[in-house]
Image (cartoon, coloured by chain):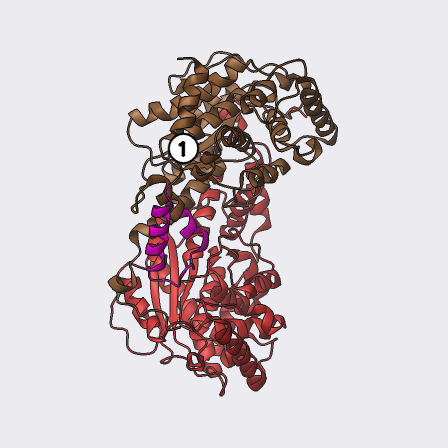
Chain colours: A brown, B red
Amino acid sequence: MSPEDTLMDTLNAIEPIAQNFMREAQKRSDNLTKPQGSLGRLEELAALVCGIKRTLKPKTENKVIFTLAADHGVAEEGVSAFPQEVTKEMISNFVNGGAGVNVLARHINAKVIVVDMGVKGEILSKDVIIKKIANGSKNFTKGLAMTREQAIKSVLYGIELVDEEMKNGTIDIVGTGDMGIANTTPSSAVVAAITHAEVEKITGRGTGISDEIFNNKIMVIKKGLNLNKPNPDDAIDVLSKVGGFEIGGIAGVILGCAKNKIPVVIDGFISGAGALIAYKLNPLTKDYMLASHQSVEQGHKILLEYIGLKPLLNLNLRLGEGTGAALGINLVEASCKILNEMATFEEADVSKKIN
Amino acid sequence: MSPEDTLMDTLNAIEPIAQNFMREAQKRSDNLTKPQGSLGRLEELAALVCGIKRTLKPKTENKVIFTLAADHGVAEEGVSAFPQEVTKEMISNFVNGGAGVNVLARHINAKVIVVDMGVKGEILSKDVIIKKIANGSKNFTKGLAMTREQAIKSVLYGIELVDEEMKNGTIDIVGTGDMGIANTTPSSAVVAAITHAEVEKITGRGTGISDEIFNNKIMVIKKGLNLNKPNPDDAIDVLSKVGGFEIGGIAGVILGCAKNKIPVVIDGFISGAGALIAYKLNPLTKDYMLASHQSVEQGHKILLEYIGLKPLLNLNLRLGEGTGAALGINLVEASCKILNEMATFEEADVSKKIN
């Protein structure tokens, strides 16, 4: 089977979430010892997870955050405040448990799976899953970021990550994460290509760049879009022309989760670009996604609205790695515990509303 | 010593938080393996906790949520959707671990301390701390909600709760919570009296009331304010004329935390009314408070802005009990772990920003 056919198989295997389980979950929620609706979005989250998992007793024990790393040829255009070797250096930091995502994953009792999707240079740690497509994507101001075959491969690798981890045991909930110096640049390009938003409106300061670099970044993104002319109706085309390997991988993780009926909590802007690719490939994925937070990156709001996702948190985060996803997973877990553990009016012998 | 003098002693014992520890904490944060400021409000939270505790290694292990319950004479004016006996019934639910606050406290590994500040009827459970002032406050449309002596007593009881729990071991962080049928009515009255906001603008639907009851609720609050004329510059006067025992108790818990240099996470609207009383008694308390969430109750935004607090979450919650505080504590704990556990650039051997 060709890679394109394998991808099509996954896209076709994604089912709509189960509305009847959502309704039953909300019914149970309405009967718990609290005024109806008084736990707001927690009630909505729990119902959504029930719809995804087709159960009224949603488990959240086995939590996995996939942190996908890759390098970007466009980094040579001077769009980031950090040198490219930081991508590889941060992988060691992830493996040693010292990065932000490690701390927050321990806080919520989640496993972090670190993946080399295309980091420049060889990763030797046996604690990193190698799904390497190339030593970084190419500079999209000079041609394609990657070939169409590589773009499809990056998405298939993401799907595989979920399928392979399922073989190690159940996954109850997934978070996405990224690492890749310069990767807000391809993310902005992907968002601009798909949503038709102006580049100026969706480009942010990434890790913290000066005005000069910021203006250059906008020019670089425009140059890449003008040169490559990605087709907004062909997400794989967009990914191959102006995307990145971790962005494709994240799209794949989301497709893998949707196929396997696992709720997937989307991190920030880079994960959002991956979410946009997944959504364009199959809009049914939307109902499997939960947006963890509203990033500082200004394009994030536009892409979440495009998909139709409402972020859970707004804490001015802009780190990536899956840090926001970890906090989001924690809220989803809380919502499921409410549904599973709270007493009903009958059980607690509490009087009901009188009017 | 008179109760009034005892209260004055606590007010005088509250010190400003330590700006130097806040600055040192931010310096450490800036040197962790992430772009500076990229963990947004988490970094601010951690710095604030360091300023409160005067340490750079803030602990959050011992977490306590105080859920203070009381009844309200004004309930007889038909301002709530639930019968008054629910206050007492919910205390059993708290003791049995079946309420929302129990579930979320277990989720964050916090202890819930349930307190009878003035519930109608006798509470027999030995798992409830009895700080009973009376069998409910009086109907403030017909006179004072409580005497000035009772108001002071409710605040002193709140302070005692913190002091007594400190004797059982350290408290690293506190959350506030409430239970009391009809208590959004006195809370709205307190907020209106202190902030001078229009009653219409700060009155919400509480547990979920109809238009008719809502309009009646506004009339009831106006009647209470017109009859009793609370003095906005005398928080104890406001509390005694239109407040409630749990509202006074929450103010006391906040004062007790400030005195003992413990960060205190404020729940929703009712806790906010307590926070307003504490803030008016001593504005230094503001820096010890963290606002967990923006409640659906429309007066909540006004009171938070009056104090100068920015809520962490916006999840359309309106349950009270300390449920929002539990979620807020969880974020504060995450922020402290970031500061304590993340590797610095030097430790992780990661390259720094180039420009």
Q: Which residue is mark 1?
A: A258
Q: Viewer-proximal residue, A27 or B141? A: A27
Instruction: Locate residue B10, reporting x and y percent.
Output: 49, 68
Question: Quick check: is B73 in the magenta stretch?
Answer: no
- How many residues crowd mark 1 within 10 Å: few (<14), some (14–19), many (20+)? many
Locate the N terminus of chain B and report the quarter of the image it occupies: bottom left
Q: Is residue A289 left or right of residue A212?
A: left
Work out whether residue A39 or residue B49 is closer to the camera in this orientation and state it: A39
Of B113 and B169, the residue lying toward us = B113
**Image point 40% across, 32% down: which residue?**
A258
- Which of the 4 image quadrants contains residue A288? top left
| Residue A94 in the image: above or below residue A122 | below
Count of marks, rendered view = 1
Q: Position of residue A327 (x, y in %)?
A: 45, 41
The kind of secondary structure the magenta stretch mainly shows is helix
Horizontal relation, residue B2 to residue A141: left or right: left
| Residue occupying the point 54% across, 42% down | B43
Q: Is residue B338 above or below residue A70?
A: below
Where residue B303 sits in the image (x, y, percent)? Answer: 57, 64
The quadrant in which the C terminus of chain B is found is top right
Can residue A131 be spotted in the picture? no
The amino acid beneath tag 1 is Ala
Chain holding disc 1: A
Q: Position of residue A28 (x, y in %)?
A: 32, 55
| Residue B57 located left or right of residue A220 | left
Label 1 element class: helix
User: Magenta stretch?
Assistant: A18-46
- A39 part of magenta stretch: yes
- Which quadrant of the figure has residue A187? top right
Any part of residue A345 in sight: yes
Residue ID at (48%, 27%): A251
